[in-house]
Image (cartoon, grey):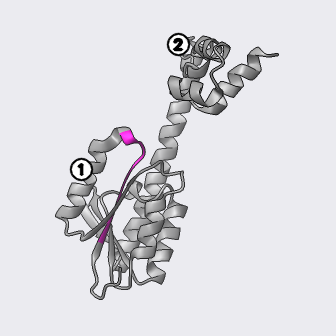
Amino acid sequence: MRRISIMLVGYARTSTVDQIAGLEAQERDLKASGVEELFAEQVSSVAQRAKLDEVLKFVRSGDVLVVTKLDRLARSTGHLLKILECLESKNVALRVIDFGGASVDTKSPTGRLMLTMFGAMAQFEREMMLERQREGIAKAKQEGKYKGRKPTVMAKAQAILSLHSQRIGPSEIAKQLGIGRASVYRVLAATSQ
């Protein structure tokens, strides 16, 4: 798509498909802020994000990339700085519309400074939250209250073996039980030893 005028381009992301309301809210807020072209995806921040790559290729000189919150865009301060470098090389500004009640725009030196500082604080906050989570899990394990996630495939081992004994192939077993084919092979390998 060839275009001449500058535009506001939005990017929205949630980590899982279960967060559809969060994605819809971001899309609503971005459109309300004047976004003309919107890229949205439901993928973890640590996974490859195709729509983020697309939006970074799409934006042109003078455009403004708009996100609702910083954590929807970058997973760490380093990642944020890499994105900012890419945008600056294309003469594209970044605007975060929900920045603790204010809006931040990288068109100004003050905006860039604030964004970098808040990016570092967001990363610090996330690391502290993960540390508290690990401590809580360790404490719960000590008290015998935390068992971890129940292995889903082993709970279906009998069903896998039953279907296999009926000469149903691993792909069909996986399809019928709603699990991965590799999981079927793992159960079959464990029982053949």
Q: What's the magenta region?
A: 9-17
Between residues 1 and 92, which one lies in front from this camera angle? 1
Q: Residue at x 17, y 62 (%)?
A: 32
Q: Position of residue 101 (x, y in %)?
A: 23, 57
Mark 1 Cα-neighbour bin, 10 Å: few <14, some 14–19, many ≥20: few
Residue 87 located left or right of residue 93: right
- Element under label 2? loop
Q: Is residue 155 visible?
A: yes
The residue singled out by tag 2 in the image is 145
Between residues 161 and 70, which one lies in front from this camera angle? 161
Mark 2 Cα-neighbour bin, 10 Å: few <14, some 14–19, many ≥20: few
Q: Quadrant of residue 135?
A: top right
Q: Residue at x 40, y 75 (%)?
A: 58
Q: Earlier in the sequence, mark 1 or mark 2?
A: 1
Q: Residue at x 66, y 18 (%)?
A: 167
Quadrant placement of the C terminus: top right
The residue singled out by tag 1 in the image is 25
Q: Position of residue 124 (x, y in %)?
A: 49, 50
Q: Residue at x 21, y 58 (%)?
A: 29
Tell me the number on the disc at residue 95.
Answer: none
Between residues 65 and 163, which one lies in front from this camera angle? 163
Give, as a three-letter code, the residue at label 2: Lys
Residue 43 located left or right of residue 157: left
Give, as a three-letter code, the residue at label 1: Ala
- Element under label 1? helix
Dominant SS in magenta: strand
Label 1, label 2: how many angstroms apart (C-alpha)? 36 Å
Q: Is residue 189 rendered magenta in the image? A: no
Furthest residue to the left?
A: 32
Residue 88 located left or right of residue 151: left
